[in-house]
């Protein structure tokens, strides 16, 4: 039977609405995509959120990014990305972007001005402060979020060009502890691992690391492990990672140092150590043996909130493993005795010989996309290229390589972040230049920080967004281009240098940080020093020269194009010579499906990876030779200290802070701009509290509570869950109010703030 | 933006540097400077990761494709959600997948599981069954439930019907859209976006047997939720997604947002449509019934006036209901779903009601025609069709399985609304046309009794406040008492004043020894206020009906 009308009259199977979503085979190996998202080219760009350093395959049309997918062959992420990576392009298009320089006018409002005015004011005001109070009265707070070349430019400009002495970065908040610990223990800030180690261990010990949420792609690498690994998580909270682990030790907050010493005690007692390795490659073991005698499991079990059997069981797991790796993140780094805690982990790896081989190591998982670049090249804690400001040879070397007057290089170290803020309090620092960070939200004891920023004579904030908590306090706001709008390199947690490319136009008059630094140099009158610093790639060549002969030697990397073709290159790479004595690396036997392997996935120009190209995954210390002059690693240890503010009758809870979800990044200036990411996390601030505590206090699920510390108070929704222990509460760090509560206490060596231990009270909101 | 160089201490060339750098900032260089990762015609490169996660063979007879989620592998990273969003080109706020959290267990062994969820491509899809225009189809081979975007009229009934909150309405397009398991990709041997993107290989495509799934969910006597703890009972639609875990999940697992109250969209046009259509049906009923019970002839104008007002209001109700549609011009296809959709039935029945009412009212106004036609039969037909429409309305909400909208609760409400508002309208017109006593007083009493019945029908929900469990009805009661308390109290006040107090006074006044002076406007104003206040009360009640209903849903995330 035929209908007297077309069937589509009754049922419209096609039309403009249907076509909007119809998928078409796309080119460039992408599979199907909707028509409006068909690219005409693709290119790999390293992600700009966290230190994992994933490769994102940006889909371009007319050179402009229209979409992205994780790069299938990139050796880091193997075709996957977390939601932040997937949404990387969205925050660029936010209406909150700063599009012109903004200057605070007589009425106290930020008012658009042109770049010329902004730069003149910048120069005049900072110079006036330096004239009146000395060059040290102007300082900067930098970041781990901009490109290495930009960090190097900022550091060189600040210290060598503008005469500043003090500059630090927000990496102080995340990585300073690992830096200090590695430098002291290994002789250089050298995370030894490569991500393949996640896949090659048979025992993985995670301390204070919620990998599933903070580094989802690294958790992907753990799940690719085919050795039925024991996955041990040491964390006060039953985090997503603790849930997914094979064993979880819910220790009491800040009892990790004692636990690690107890583990060392057991391993020594039972002879579960590698005497040969210790003798050949380390110093200080004998005194360490004496020191840990006091840390029998019976002594520490109660303090750690564990049973003696549990501690013994943990030591046995470490002993049984053939390839044991130790990993930590902010749960360790952000502690009042964090450097020693980190070194307690390093000690365990050294004494068991679990380092330098596949699947081993004492491995710091970094936070920000370019924290590692900042560590080597920001010219803050280290002189450019991992050099030492206190070392006259290093100063001379750098002065010669840069062609600058030796006197321009300070012969003393910068103040750390907290000390710069103290300098404001003491009236020594009057001008501050904040670049790509948001201290008015993120710094510990927030009210104190905001108060200090308000005391400055001149505060310049350089950021992508004009409405960050810090920008709102600035006298001058400089609009930055963001990730994807500029070129440069990032260095990820496994020392891999990856490339950022320009795939989107910056809005309005926003300029890359690199261009802003060029302009500042010019306006300041020190442009001559930076006459060769004309492009990020030119600075990359300068960085290569600075690194030559250092443990972080990258002189073998030809140029950006080589980085691009190799899928990133781990330092050190000095060419083939780098594999000679002094720069031992062990290539992973792990085979990658992508970069570096034939046949179909290789860049056809490159063919099979030739010997002059670096292997895809390499780790340090294969020969047990460390970077101290004697080639030995050091056992470093110290008696545990009390936390600054134990819980008491008035403030009976310990406040833990940390990452909330994988869709949130730090102070949310970017992740808050994506509607999709916003759907992934609770909009308002919430507090996790144990059911017994909630019941005792009369706190109903989802009701509002007041959380107070000696420094401030906030209101939050209660999420009643046994994943926190009684007597502890957890609040994600992404919410503006969280740091009203935290206590400004710092590790004495790394000056890293201890965000995860202060005393608070909780009560239902009336 | 240039300054006068002479007033500046800065050399002129720096100003040109600003311009040069601004220009350089706008040039995009990635393509020219760097290698391209892939040839234009490269095969999908992600295949190596998902090859084992999909099936290339089509399902056999009685079987279909289904998502399978390994709860032990899911770490809650939500890459699946963003990948689906990006690879399918969804709107900025649009997501077809979601990730929630189940938590519980014991204090010593707390358990939490993140749950990724999209369309479950049900064996018996509620969306499909409810669609008035057949904009859904279940693929005969793959079992994938597809939405025909150009067929959709944007009525959003599927949104109400789906217990898993799957269809998403787009304001921009005026239609809903939903997951189709990336059927186009699957048919080309590519994995759905979510499967491609999961770093932990937690989502895969499998084949399930439809009959055995139906049997498992519909014939099982088990009290436990065999689909997933903390989620809607699967017997309703037989969802095909399988959630696996190597560990037995404790029954105590609850959604992280289980205790969260979720106010729902007010659907204002629907609220007006319900109240006004019921008013119209009630008025037509009185128009037909009154001649049987009271002396009408004393006010010959009442009947046509009541008919005309009822017709006008009825047509207005139907007109307003189209405001709810994202694409009203396709609404004529609404008869297509008659076999299964109560919405289809409601639309068709009220359409017939409108036609009958028009004819009937026409006859009332043109008495010469009455001799050749059968006004009474037509009138009764209008009334019966109208009540069938009201019943269809009640059934279409009943059929969403939402507890607050069950027939035993909303049926009496809708009937009472029709009665009291019909009576109030008749009262106004009776006074206006000078109908003699006792008609106005009787109508006032009918308003009063109708309102008492109505308020009584709205009361039982508050019994659920006693529950400790956060059932949907408990949550509805808490919303009505808490966040919606002001609106609810206003509604009750309007009912008490406009539907009880004022009608009582009116009835007393009419029967008192001192009736209002002939020609006085006061009784008319009094009656009009009764109608307006009652109407206001009913509209508020219906607004609450929509906002306070609590649907079942898949586990959500932490609520804050």
Image (tube, coloured by chain):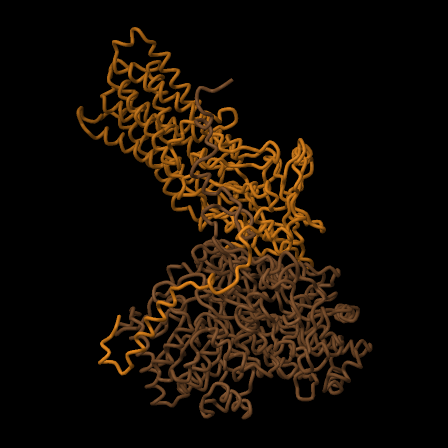
Chain colours: A brown, B orange
Classify residue A288 as left or right of residue A511.
right
Name the quadrant containing residue A230: bottom right
Q: Of B348 and A149, which appears nearest the observer? A: A149
Q: Position of residue B365 (x, y in %)?
A: 26, 16
Q: Position of residue A316 (x, y in %)?
A: 79, 70
For the view shown, which residue lies furthest in the right direction?
A270
Q: Position of residue A654 (x, y in %)?
A: 58, 70
Give the vertical position of B434 relative to A590 (above or below): above
Classify residue A120 as left or right of residue A391.
left
Name the quadrant containing residue A447: bottom left
Give the vertical position of A165 relative to A451 (above or below): below
Q: Specify whether residue A192 is in view.
A: yes
For the view shown, which residue lies furthest in the top direction?
B372
Q: Specify whether residue B99 is in view.
A: no
Classify residue A129 as left or right of residue A556.
left
Q: Of A514 and B84, which appears nearest the observer? A: A514
Give the vertical position of A176 relative to A245 (above or below): below
Give the vertical position of A134 relative to A750 (above or below): below
Q: How many marks?
A: 0
Q: Residue at x 25, y 24 (%)?
A: B431
User: Dividing the image into 4 quarters, which one contains the N terminus of chain B?
Assistant: bottom left
Q: Position of residue B370 (x, y in %)?
A: 29, 9
Q: Of B250 and A705, which appears nearest the observer? A: B250
């Amino acid at each position: 039977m035929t209908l007297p009308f077309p069937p589509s009259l009754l049922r419209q199977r096609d039309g403009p609405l249907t076509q909007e979503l119809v998928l078409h085979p796309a080119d460039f190996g992408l599979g199907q995509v909707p028509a409006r998202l068909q690219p005409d080219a693709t290119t790999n760009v390293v992600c700009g959120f966290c230190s994992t350093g994933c490769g994102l395959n940006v889909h371009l049309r007319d050179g402009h990014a229209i979409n992205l997918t994780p790069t299938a062959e990139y050796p880091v992420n193997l075709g996957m990305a977390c939601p932040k990576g997937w949404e990387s392009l969205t925050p660029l298009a936010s209406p909150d972007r700063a599009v012109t320089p903004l200057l605070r006018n007589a009425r106290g409002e930020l008012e658009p001005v042109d770049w010329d005015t902004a730069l003149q004011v910048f120069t005049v005001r900072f110079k006036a402060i330096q004239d009146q109070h000395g060059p040290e009265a102007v300082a900067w707070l930098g970041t781990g979020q901009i490109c290495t070349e930009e960090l190097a430019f900022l550091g060189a400009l600040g210290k060598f060009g503008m005469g500043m002495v003090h500059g630090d970065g927000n990496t102080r908040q995340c990585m300073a502890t690992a830096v200090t610990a590695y430098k002291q223990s290994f002789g250089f800030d050298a995370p030894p691992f490569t991500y393949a180690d996640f896949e090659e261990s048979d025992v993985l010990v995670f301390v204070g690391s919620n990998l599933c949420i903070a580094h989802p792609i690294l958790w992907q690498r753990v799940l690719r492990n085919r050795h039925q690994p024991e996955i041990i998580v040491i964390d006060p909270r039953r985090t997503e990672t603790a849930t997914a682990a094979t064993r979880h030790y819910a220790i009491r907050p800040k009892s990790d140092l004692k636990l690690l010493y107890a583990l060392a005690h057991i391993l020594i007692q039972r002879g579960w150590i590698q005497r040969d390795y210790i003798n050949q490659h380390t110093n200080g073991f004998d005194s360490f043996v004496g020191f840990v005698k006091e840390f029998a499991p019976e002594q520490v079990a109660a303090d750690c909130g564990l049973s003696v059997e549990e501690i013994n069981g943990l030591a046995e797991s470490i002993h049984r493993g053939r390839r044991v790796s130790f990993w930590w993140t902010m749960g360790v780094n952000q502690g009042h005795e964090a450097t020693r805690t980190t070194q307690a982990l390093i000690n365990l790896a050294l004494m068991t010989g679990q380092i330098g081989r596949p699947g081993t190591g004492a491995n710091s998982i970094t936070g920000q996309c370019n924290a590692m670049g900042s560590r080597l090249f920001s010219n803050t804690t280290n002189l450019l290229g991992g050099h030492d400001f206190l070392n006259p040879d290093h100063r001379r070397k750098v002065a010669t390589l840069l062609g600058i007057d030796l006197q321009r290089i300070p012969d003393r170290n910068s103040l750390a972040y907290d000390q710069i803020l103290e300098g404001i309090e003491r009236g020594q620092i009057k001008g501050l230049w904040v670049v790509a960070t948001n201290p008015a939200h993120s710094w510990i004891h927030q009210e104190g920080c905001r108060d200090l920023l308000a005391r400055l004579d001149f505060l310049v904030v350089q950021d992508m967004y004009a409405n960050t908590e810090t920008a709102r306090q600035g006298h001058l706001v400089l609009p930055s281009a963001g990730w994807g709008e500029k070129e440069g390199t990032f260095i990820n947690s496994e020392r891999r240098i990856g490339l950022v490319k320009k795939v989107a136009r910056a809005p309005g008059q926003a300029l890359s940080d690199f261009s802003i630094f060029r302009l500042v140099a010019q306006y300041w009158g020190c442009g001559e020093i930076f006459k060769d610093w004309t492009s990020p790639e030119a600075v990359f060549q300068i960085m290569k020269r600075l690194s030559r002969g250092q443990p972080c030697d990258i002189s073998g990397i030809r140029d950006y194009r080589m980085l691009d073709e190799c899928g990133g290159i781990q330092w050190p790479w000095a060419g083939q010579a780098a594999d000679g004595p002094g720069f031992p690396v062990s290539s992973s036997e792990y085979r990658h499906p992508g970069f570096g392997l034939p046949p179909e996935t290789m860049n056809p120009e490159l063919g099979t990876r030739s010997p002059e190209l670096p292997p895809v995954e390499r780790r340090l210390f294969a020969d047990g030779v460390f970077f101290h002059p004697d080639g030995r690693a050091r056992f470093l240890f110290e008696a545990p200290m009390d936390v600054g503010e134990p819980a008491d009758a008035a403030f009976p809870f310990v406040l833990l802070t940390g990452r909330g979800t994988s869709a949130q990044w730090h102070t949310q200036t970017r992740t808050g701009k994506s509607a999709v990411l916003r759907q992934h996390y609770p909009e308002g601030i919430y507090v996790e509290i144990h059911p017994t505590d909630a019941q005792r206090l009369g706190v109903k699920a989802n009701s509002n509570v007041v959380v107070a510390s000696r420094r401030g108070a906030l209101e939050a929704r209660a999420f009643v869950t046994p994943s926190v222990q009684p007597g502890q509460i957890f609040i994600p760090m992404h919410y503006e109010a969280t740091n009203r509560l935290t206590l400004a206490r710092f590790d004495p060596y790394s000056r890293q703030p201890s965000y995860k231990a202060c005393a608070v009270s909780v009560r239902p909101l009336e | 933006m240039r300054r006068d160089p002479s007033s500046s201490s800065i050399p002129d060339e720096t100003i040109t540097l600003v311009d040069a750098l601004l220009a350089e900032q706008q040039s995009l260089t990635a393509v020219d400077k760097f290698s391209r990762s892939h040839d234009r015609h490269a095969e999908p490169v992600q295949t190596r990761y998902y090859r084992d996660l999909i099936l290339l063979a089509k399902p056999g007879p009685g079987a279909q494709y289904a998502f399978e989620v390994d709860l032990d592998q899911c770490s809650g990273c939500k890459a699946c959600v963003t990948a689906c969003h990006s690879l399918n080109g969804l709107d900025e706020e649009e997501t077809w997948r979601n990730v929630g959290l189940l938590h519980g267990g014991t204090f010593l062994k707390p358990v939490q599981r993140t749950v990724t969820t999209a369309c479950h491509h049900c064996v018996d899809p509620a969306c499909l069954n409810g669609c008035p225009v057949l904009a859904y189809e279940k693929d005969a081979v793959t079992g994938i439930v597809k939405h025909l975007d150009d067929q959709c009229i944007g009525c959003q009934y599927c949104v109400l019907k789906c217990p898993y909150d799957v269809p998403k309405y787009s304001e921009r397009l005026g239609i809903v859209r939903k997951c189709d398991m990336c059927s186009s990709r699957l048919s080309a041997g590519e994995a759905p976006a979510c499967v491609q993107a999961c770093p932990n290989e937690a989502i895969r495509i499998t084949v399930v047997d439809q009959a055995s799934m139906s049997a498992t969910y519909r014939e099982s006597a088990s009290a436990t939720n065999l689909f997933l703890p903390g989620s809607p009972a699967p017997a309703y639609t037989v969802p095909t997604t399988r959630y696996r875990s190597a560990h037995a999940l404790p029954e105590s697992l609850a959604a992280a947002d289980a205790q969260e109250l979720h106010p729902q969209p007010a659907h204002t046009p629907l609220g007006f449509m319900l109240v006004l259509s019921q008013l119209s049906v009630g008025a037509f009923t009185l128009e037909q019934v009154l001649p049987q019970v009271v002396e009408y002839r004393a006010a010959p104008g009442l009947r046509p006036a009541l008919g005309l007002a009822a017709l006008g209001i009825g047509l207005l109700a139907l007109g307003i209901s189209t405001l709810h549609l994202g694409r009203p011009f396709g609404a004529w296809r609404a008869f297509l779903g008659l076999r299964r959709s109560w919405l289809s039935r409601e639309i068709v029945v009220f359409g017939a009601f409108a036609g009958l009412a028009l004819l009937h009212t026409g006859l009332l106004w043109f008495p010469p025609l009455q001799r050749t036609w059968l006004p009474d039969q037509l009138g009764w037909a209008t009334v019966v069709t109208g009540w069938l429409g009201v019943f269809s309305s009640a059934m279409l909400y009943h059929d969403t399985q939402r507890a607050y909208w069950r027939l035993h609760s909303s049926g009496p409400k809708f009937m009472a609304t029709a009665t009291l508002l019909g009576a109030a309208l008749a009262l106004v017109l009776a006074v206006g046309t000078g109908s003699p006593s006792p008609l106005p007083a009787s109508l006032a009493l009918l308003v009063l009794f109708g309102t008492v019945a109505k308020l009584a029908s709205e009361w039982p929900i508050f019994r659920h406040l006693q529950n400790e469990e956060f059932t949907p009805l408990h949550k509805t009661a808490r919303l009505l008492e808490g966040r919606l308390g002001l609106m609810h109290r206003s509604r009750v006040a309007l009912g008490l004043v406009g539907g009880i107090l004022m009608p009582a006074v009116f009835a007393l006044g009419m029967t008192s020894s001192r009736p209002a002076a002939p020609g006085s406007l006061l009784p008319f104003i009094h009656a009009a206020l009764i109608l307006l206040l009652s109407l206001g009360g009913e509209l508020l009640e219906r607004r609450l009906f929509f906002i306070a209903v609590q649907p079942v849903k898949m586990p959500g995330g932490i609520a804050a």
